[in-house]
Image (cartoon, rainbow, N blue to C red):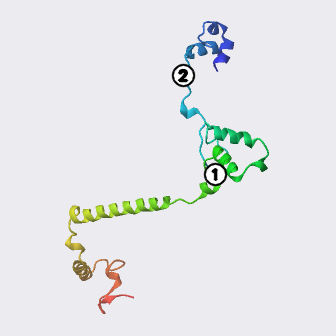
Amino acid sequence: MLSVLAQRSPLLAKMRVLGAIGVRAAHSHGDHVDAVPSYTKPAYFDHRTLPLPDIPFHDGLTSQENALKEKEKGPWKQLSLEDKISLYRIKFNQTYAEMNKPTNEWKSVFGAIFFFFGITGLIVWWQRVHVFPQLPHTLEEDWKERQVRRMLDMRVGPIEGFSSKWDYEKNEWKK
């Protein structure tokens, strides 16, 4: 957008108010350039969906590994199985079989879940014993039965309500 404005207004571009030159000059670092942060460099990690990592597993090779890399350039029939495995381990940390190997992490997850269930159960028990008050006497079964009997005696809701479902002649609930 700045370059479009600079093309339309050459005076502003000359004064470096608008234009790419003014922007670059305002944001330049001069002669000082910082080192590249480590998080911007390519990193090695094994993952099944990304079979080729950005960099090899071993960056700095020993003299023995360098000799093996030179031997790799020749015919592969001359390489022993141990050499091939060593070459693979220079490039990769794990094989697909090692990456796909099941872990015992599920045990830790279930252990943590059961631990928190236990802590929650202890908190609920403590609250029932020490925090919540006793239940009111109106929730006892004897009180509920007496309340129902009183409502029937008072004939509460005789047409469509509570008492309409009671047979007063047989002294039982209607079927």
Spot occupied by residue 35 in the image (x, y as percentages of width and height): 55, 24
Q: Quadrant of residue 161?
A: bottom left
Instruction: State the residue in front, 12 or 111.
Output: 111
Give amino acid for label 1.
Answer: Arg
Spot occupied by residue 36 in the image (x, y as percentages of width and height): 56, 27
Q: Quadrant of residue 2?
A: top right
Dot 1 or dot 2: first in sequence order is: 2
The image's mark for residue 21 is none
Spot occupied by residue 118 in the image (x, y as percentages of width and height): 34, 63
Disc 1 element: loop
Residue name at image x 57 percent, y 14 percent: 31
**Separation of marks 1 and 2 at Cα, in angstroms:** 35 Å
Q: Which residue is mark 2?
A: 34
Q: Quadrant of the C terminus?
A: bottom left
Q: Which residue is mark 1?
A: 48
Disc 2 element: loop
Residue name at image x 60 percent, y 6 percent: 15
* Lateral position of residue 54 relative to residue 27, left or right: right
Whether residue 51 appears in this view of the structure is: no
Q: Is residue 78 above or below residue 154?
A: above
Residue name at image x 65 percent, y 40 percent: 64
Spot occupied by residue 145 in the image (x, y as percentages of width and height): 25, 81
* Lateral position of residue 49 relative to residue 149, left or right: right
Q: Is residue 14 above or below residue 47?
A: above
Q: Is residue 77 above or below residue 122?
A: above
